[in-house]
Image (cartoon, rainbow, N blue to C red):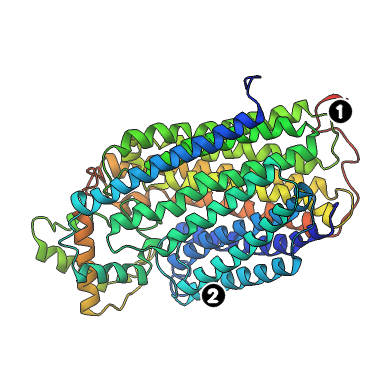
Amino acid sequence: MKYETQKVALPFFMVAMALFTLQIVFGLLAAAVYAWPNFMAEVMPFHIMRVSHTNLLIVWLLIGFMGCTYYLMPEEAEQEIHSPNLAYIQLAIFAFAGAAALVGYQFGIHEGREFLEQPFWVKILITISFLMFLFNTSMTLLKGRKTAINLVLMLGLWLAAVFWLFAFYNPTNLAVDKLYWWWVVHLWVEGVWELIMASLLGYLLIKMTGVDREVIEKWLYIIVGLALFSGLLGTGHHYYWIGAPGYWQPIGSIFSTLEVAPFFAMVVFAFTMFWKGSRNHPNKAAMLWALGCPTIAFFGAGVWGFMHTLSFVNYYSHGTQVTAAHGHLAFYGAYVMLILGVITYAMPQIRRVQPYNQILNMWGFWIVTSAMCFMTFTLTFAGVVQTHLQRVLGMNYMEVQDQLGLFYIMRLGAGVAVAVGAIMLLYSFFGPAREQVPAGGTQITAGAGSA
Amino acid sequence: MADGLTKSAARNIFYGGSLFFFLLFAALTAHSHWYMVNVSTDSEALTDSVKHGKEVWEKNMCINCHTIMGEGAYFAPELGNVWERYGGLENPDAARAGINAWIRAQPLGIEGRRQMPAFDFSEKDMNSLIDFLEWTNSINDQDWPPHPAG
């Protein structure tokens, strides 16, 4: 940690990880209802668990992005954070807004549009906090060095704020409502968040591989270009069945097929830089995350997205467990792993120690990642069976669900494994910093210095 | 990547290309908006009751169990075509009575079956909600879902 204000990131990481833990708790509860339908039906109906699970994800990822940005910005801009106090205040506002929304959901206080359920005043607080964050980080950037990494990152964050404004627009015509609802939901996760993802990944690779910045930054522009060229019109794959014109079927099919390209490029990018790299970075766990993140994102967002993105496939699979399978692995690979990776990289430096608890961290990586993959497979099988029985044979929804019990039990098991791995990760981040293991080893370092 | 491609060229392609695709996307969205309001949805039938029904739908967060036009949670049946499923296209009165009775009967309390919570709707709210579901069913959505089962 070269700059004192990089430690601003620490409370962001702590809040993000607390919310991550809660997200897993609500996910486990919801998964349990799939296995035992009467589970907690009187105390907490399913929809409350589900809204808590999804909203916690969004809030903790945003707080995680903020933490990552505060950590990275001083190094990239060669400039201390404009105002650390402003950062703490905006975190407090954001965390309060998120917590208030979460408590409110338990009492049925919400706006009732999927993912944008936050009550109006919570949306206002989130906006204010996010603007304070953008002001603080943009001021830091303006005063300092401008690199492709921090420019693309800030562009992604600013555009995320711009598209968030569509959350305030709720037309009475349901079709029009959905048309613009995707301007937040899709343009975030399959658009501007990919800018954030690629730039943070680029940062990790510069730091850990020692590859020349020029090379990495050129790649970065190519990847984020591919992401937006495909992702903007790729929104079309959500416009097939909501009353939009028929031309979205070919446009959505073609451009969402191309959406695989940036994820594939990120895999090639990360592994190429890793092999070209000459630096024997001691933080092997962080390197593992930096390679794992684009790989799982490629499968989750790329391959699993492509599986049901063509309109003539989607006609049958839309809104089944196939979607749930894709959603889980895509979010985990692209954004969850990214933030866990940055935390793995940053925590030893924030705590001013050598990389520590690496074996534990890597076990956490493999357990959570394997469990998420297994969860995705079970939901995919469930979705394929569901698609056939319900959409082809025309069986009733609940009859079909009765056929899927085994998959849902296996999914719950996978969720328990995720929770176990997550506890290991949290302990490896925040627990006592034991000796760095493996000691200076070469397990996952390639290139000249590794022999 | 081609050796000839410099970083600044890559940057310019990114900014220029993204702007181009965004403008194209915005233009198509504007046309889609026009198309939805004028062609694919019945704007004249979008009565105050349908509007209120959408509010009832949102106030009770139906979306976090059910899907509507395939979007939402995947825990309970699709409702975008529930009107058709209850025979509303042939016999609207029976469909209305059927949906009403079904919601009023919740929770069914059958062991081993997912429970829909009891929602204590007033007659007005219930009618509006059903109006909203009837209106939603009328959206021209490229014949989705493939089967009335949803």
Amino acid type, residue under disc 1 in the picture: Ser
- Classify residue A269 as left or right of residue A237: right
At 15% from the left and 66% from the top, the residue drawn is B96
Q: Which residue is mark 1?
A: A450
Give the spatial CA distance, label 2 vs label 1: 51 Å
Q: Can residue A312 be seen at all in this image of the molecule? A: no
At 56% from the left and 48% from the top, the residue drawn is A193
On the image, the x and y values in percent for residue A248 come to: 32, 39
Residue A21 quadrant: bottom right
At 69% from the left and 39% from the top, the residue drawn is A202
Q: Which mark is residue A103?
A: 2
Q: Are marks 2 and 1 in contact (CB under 8 Å)?
A: no
- Split into 4 quadrants, where in the image is the C terminus of chain A? top right
Disc 2 element: helix
Disc 1 element: helix
Q: Can residue A72 be seen at all in this image of the molecule? A: yes
Q: Give the mark, 2 or 1, whose residue is nearer the N terminus.
A: 2
Q: Which mark is residue B135?
A: none
- Read off the chain for label 1: A
Residue A24 quadrant: bottom right
